[in-house]
């Protein structure tokens, strides 16, 4: 029984960490700006884009 519970908890945790892949086309100038900003914040470009999208959704929810 305990092993079953642990397996379910592991599955739930894995589902929360799942990432979806998308193709994103950006103008070079925007890419350069995001890249510079990411460098300032010590993030990868993907990390910076994820951060920006997360913040945007959070602010939208506050409405």
Image (tube, rainbow, N blue to C red):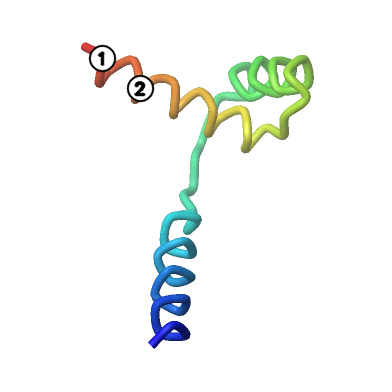
Q: Secondary structure at mark 2?
A: helix
Please state which of residues 63 and 13 is positioned toward the viewer in this rendering: 13
Mark 2 lies on residue: 58
Say if mark 2 contacts mark 1, CB within 8 Å.
yes
Q: Position of residue 31 (x, y in %)?
A: 63, 24
- Vertical comparison of 48 with 37: above or below: below
Please state which of residues 31 and 41 is positioned toward the viewer in this rendering: 41
Q: Residue furthest left?
A: 63
Question: What is the number of the mark on residue 12?
Answer: none
Question: Which image quarter: residue 11?
Answer: bottom left
**Disc 2: CA contacts within 10 A as few (<14), some (14-19) or many (>=20):** few
Q: Report the residue at 61% width, 28% height from top.
A: 48
Judge left or right: residue 47 versus residue 24: right
Question: Which image quarter: residue 40?
Answer: top right
Question: What is the number of the mark on residue 62?
Answer: 1
Number of callouts: 2
Q: Report the residue at 71% width, 22% height from top.
A: 38
Q: Report the residue at 44% width, 21% height from top.
A: 55
Q: Position of residue 58 (x, y in %)?
A: 35, 22
Judge left or right: residue 2 versus residue 42: left
Q: Alpha-carbon distance for marks 2 and 1? A: 7 Å
């Amino acid at each position: 029984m305990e092993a079953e519970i642990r397996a379910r908890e592991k599955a739930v945790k894995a589902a929360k960490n799942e990432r979806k892949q998308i193709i994103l086309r950006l103008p070079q100038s925007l890419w350069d700006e995001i890249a510079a900003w990411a460098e300032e914040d010590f993030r990868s470009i993907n990390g910076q884009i994820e951060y920006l999208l997360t913040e945007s959704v959070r602010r939208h929810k506050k409405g």
